Image (spheres, rainbow, N blue to C red):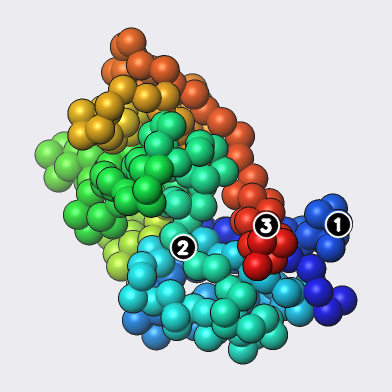
């Protein structure tokens, strides 16, 4: 296949792509590993290149137009990513549309100026996209600063509170279910095991531990349940920040964290009284492909 329109949604833990045929029908779709738009980091650049190479190999396509949205992708890296896409997928640089994954997700849910979107996955960030193209962002500052309510936040908060209990009592106390679940996922219960997992891995690997926190909550661990409820409050804060800085509009929440455990939605909704809150199901990769096709038609 030598034509078609490709949409790529690059996330920290997983990436998805959709290829549209000339008539707009879905010709192929697939998934790949996670990556970021941090091309200034050699390791992250290599990850992104590997994802793009896999998409090129699996799809067998040389798309006429590509739209790529990637987490952490900023304007300074747009040209760099266009070159990577051109080299690996054979699409002319001028036919590669670049944006971060939040703008892509927003456009998949709202028309510009009509809502606020919060995404909670490996990280967490809120966005309002004005009709004129300007934006207001809240959160999204990475796990070293905050990313409140995100998968990495949930995981690191759980580890922090477990180790505080170990410091004070010599064991995990009432959080024994959570501790056992996390230690098994990290390959052992020693500090060396935790240190190697957290400081030797990446944010995607850390964020995946949030699933284990949810599993511990399902098994009745009170600390895990409290952490998940706190995550909902953190995510509500992002929505309220956008309302305060712009105006009251519908607030949409997307991302894997929202589906981790009912406690997250419950606490989130309780912290947003009087707001129009929704949890839309999005297909950002499909929307990206549709944007690519529209760009081709209007050119």
For marks 3 and 2 on the same chain, the one whose residue lies earlier in the sequence: 2
Where's residue 286, x and y in %? 68, 51
Residue depicted at x 63% and y 83%: 92
For marks 1 and 2 on the same chain, the one whose residue lies earlier in the sequence: 1
Viewer-side residue, 154 vs 184: 154
> Do the numbered discs 1 and 3 sit on residues whose CB atoms are within 8 Å?
no
Helix, strand or loop at mark 1 = loop
> Do the numbered discs 3 and 2 sit on residues whose CB atoms are within 8 Å?
no
> Do the numbered discs 1 and 2 sit on residues whose CB atoms are within 8 Å?
no
Tell me the number on the disc at residue 296.
Answer: none
For disc 1, the marked residue is 23
Viewer-side residue, 91 vs 160: 91
Tell me the number on the disc at residue 294.
Answer: 3
Where's residue 149, x and y in %? 33, 38
The answer to whether 85 is drawn above or below residue 27 in the figure is below
Query: Does residue 58 appear anywhere in the picture?
Result: no
Q: Residue furthest front?
A: 299
User: Is disc 3 surrounded by few (<14), some (14 to 19) or many (20+) residues within 10 Å?
Assistant: some
Tell me the number on the disc at residue 99.
Answer: 2
Query: Does residue 299 appear anywhere in the picture?
Result: yes
């Amino acid at each position: 296949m030598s034509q078609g329109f490709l949409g790529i949604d690059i996330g920290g833990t997983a990436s998805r792509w959709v290829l549209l045929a000339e008539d707009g029908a879905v010709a192929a779709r697939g998934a790949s590993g996670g990556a970021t738009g941090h091309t200034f980091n050699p390791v992250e650049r290599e990850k992104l290149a590997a994802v793009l190479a896999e998409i090129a190999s699996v799809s067998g396509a040389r798309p006429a137009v590509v739209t790529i949205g990637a987490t952490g992708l900023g304007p300074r890296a747009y040209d760099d990513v266009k070159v990577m896409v051109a080299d690996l997928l054979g699409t002319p640089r001028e036919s590669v549309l670049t944006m971060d994954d939040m703008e892509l997700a927003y456009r998949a849910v709202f028309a510009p100026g009509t809502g606020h979107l919060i995404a909670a996955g490996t990280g967490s960030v809120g966005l309002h996209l004005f009709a004129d193209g300007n934006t207001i962002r809240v959160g999204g500052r990475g796990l070293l600063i905050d990313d409140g309510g995100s998968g990495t936040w949930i995981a690191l908060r759980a580890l922090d509170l477990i180790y505080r209990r170990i410091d004070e009592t010599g064991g995990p106390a009432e959080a024994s279910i959570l501790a056992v679940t996390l230690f098994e996922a990290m390959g052992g219960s020693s500090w060396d095991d935790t240190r190697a997992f957290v400081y030797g891995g990446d944010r995607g690997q850390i964020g995946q531990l949030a699933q284990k926190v949810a599993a511990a909550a399902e098994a009745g661990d009170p600390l895990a349940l409290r952490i998940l409820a706190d995550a909902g409050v953190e995510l509500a804060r992002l929505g309220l920040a956008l309302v305060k800085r712009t105006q009251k509009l519908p607030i949409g929440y997307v991302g894997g964290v929202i589906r981790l455990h009912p406690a997250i939605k419950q606490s989130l909704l309780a912290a947003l009284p009087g707001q129009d809150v929704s949890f839309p199901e999005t297909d950002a990769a499909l929307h990206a492909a549709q944007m690519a096709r529209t760009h081709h038609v209007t050119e």
